[in-house]
Image (cartoon, helix red, strand yellow):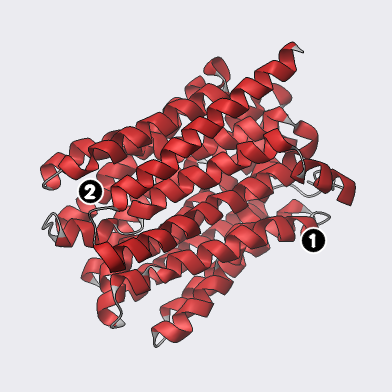
Amino acid sequence: MTARAPWAAAGRALMFGNFAVGCGVMVVPGALNDLSRSLAVAPAVAGQLITAAAVAVGTGAPLLAAALGHWDRRRLLALAMAWYAAGHALAALAPDFTLLLPLRVAGVLGAAVFTPQAAAAINVLAPPAERGRAITRVFLGWSLSSVLGMPMGSFIAETLGWRWAFGAVALLSATAAAWVWRAVPDGVRPPPLSPQSWRSALTHPVLMAMVAVTALSGAGQFTLFSYFAPYYRQVLGASAAQVSGLFFWFGAFGLLGNLLLTRWVDRLGAARCVQIALALMALSLLAWPWARGPGAMVLVLVPWALGCFSSNSAQQARLSQSAPAYAPALLALNTSAIYVGQAAGAGGGGAILAGAGFGPLSWAGLAWMATAIALSAWVTRRMQGRLHA
């Protein structure tokens, strides 16, 4: 076996794990129509599943990273996916919304562990010259979930019901747990961070601003993304097939964006890639009100999709390269920021939807995104100043 083979094989397993995680995260937005209908709750109420789960992952990611940092990553990652599988299986059996909500919260804690620790593990396994590309490849799993998982989850929910969609995520997650157990070698233990290292990372203004960019962009996206399915149905008059088709279209360009990032991130630099991705998403949010039907929405979705998943991948590479000594903490905090942003966006979007309807959602999302762009530019200037000092 070559020196490259172990980390490459592990990378494929971790990519599939992120695919399963992405399918689980996006199963609720894709199934929101059937969830609200079958459980007799309003879409804004069903959207609380996104908010509550995001809060759980956002708070759990850094706490679990600190508590479990000494674990062998093979065991930790496989157990996280097994937990994720069990959580979705139990959620699929929930008789009502009251029980579904805590089951959803508990189940997604597996994602709080898996996503940052997968990045930390491949950061140890991959050769230094290929770490940026290796991390973005692991996060291709999220893009693949948008191409395959999100539209299939939406189609399953629209035709068979949301319980079948949750069951499919459980099956994918169990498969990922077995694959990770087989492919990731024993003895992968990124150096645990001391409490002082955690404090240094948490009190570093530029690094925390970099993490905040993730939260702000996530809030901008999920203000509207959380309610794609009911928007397509109620505002655009899309059929079930058209709803699934729009999710597939979005996912296909999301995958393309991440593939392009994997090719160009080491040439352009992670910071520049982040700015490009954020600008693309802002463009779609700006154009959103002028999409009057499914046909026009096809065009409006393209820039957003290109930037959506690639922005998170570029942020992971940016953080790991900016402060390698703090990479485990920063990757956990960045995962936390992803879900904090989702919680803020879904919660804020739900409040806007309940009070004012769909109209203001894109403008609220654009305000979040513009703030993310401005903060990211400030971080880049500060990092360049540090390098030239």
**Mark found first going from the N terminus, 2 or 1:** 1
Q: Could you say where residue 63 lies in the image, as x and y percent from the top left? A: 73, 60
Crowd rating for badge 1 (residues with CA inside 10 Å; few <14, some 14–19, many 20+): few
Q: Which mark is residue 32?
A: none
Q: Is residue 254 left or right of residue 73?
A: left
Q: Secondary structure at mark 1?
A: helix
Task: Tell me the distance, in whole angstroms, between the alpha carbons under discs 2 and 1.
Answer: 40 Å
Amino acid type assigned to the residue bearing label 1 in the image = Ala
Residue in view at x 10 percent, y 58 percent: 237
Q: Secondary structure at mark 2?
A: helix
Q: Which mark is residue 67?
A: 1
Crowd rating for badge 2 (residues with CA inside 10 Å; few <14, some 14–19, many 20+): many
Counting labels gives: 2
Q: Could you say where residue 95 lies in the image, as x and y percent from the top left? A: 40, 88
Which residue was labeled with disc 2?
A: 246
Q: Is residue 317 left or right of residue 189?
A: left
Nearest the eye: 178 or 48 = 48
Amino acid type assigned to the residue bearing label 2 in the image = Leu
Q: Which quadrant of the view contains residue 155? A: bottom left
Tell me the quarter of the image containing the N terminus: top right
Q: Which quadrant of the view contains residue 230? A: bottom left
Q: Which quadrant of the view contains residue 38? A: bottom left
Answer whether residue 318 is visible to the viewer in this image: yes
Residue farthest to the bottom, as pictured: 95
Q: Could you say where residue 356 lies in the image, as x and y percent from the top left? A: 26, 62
Nearest the eye: 329 or 364 = 364
In this rendering, is residue 186 above or below 324? Answer: below
Q: Could you say where residue 329 lies in the image, as x and y percent from the top left? A: 74, 46
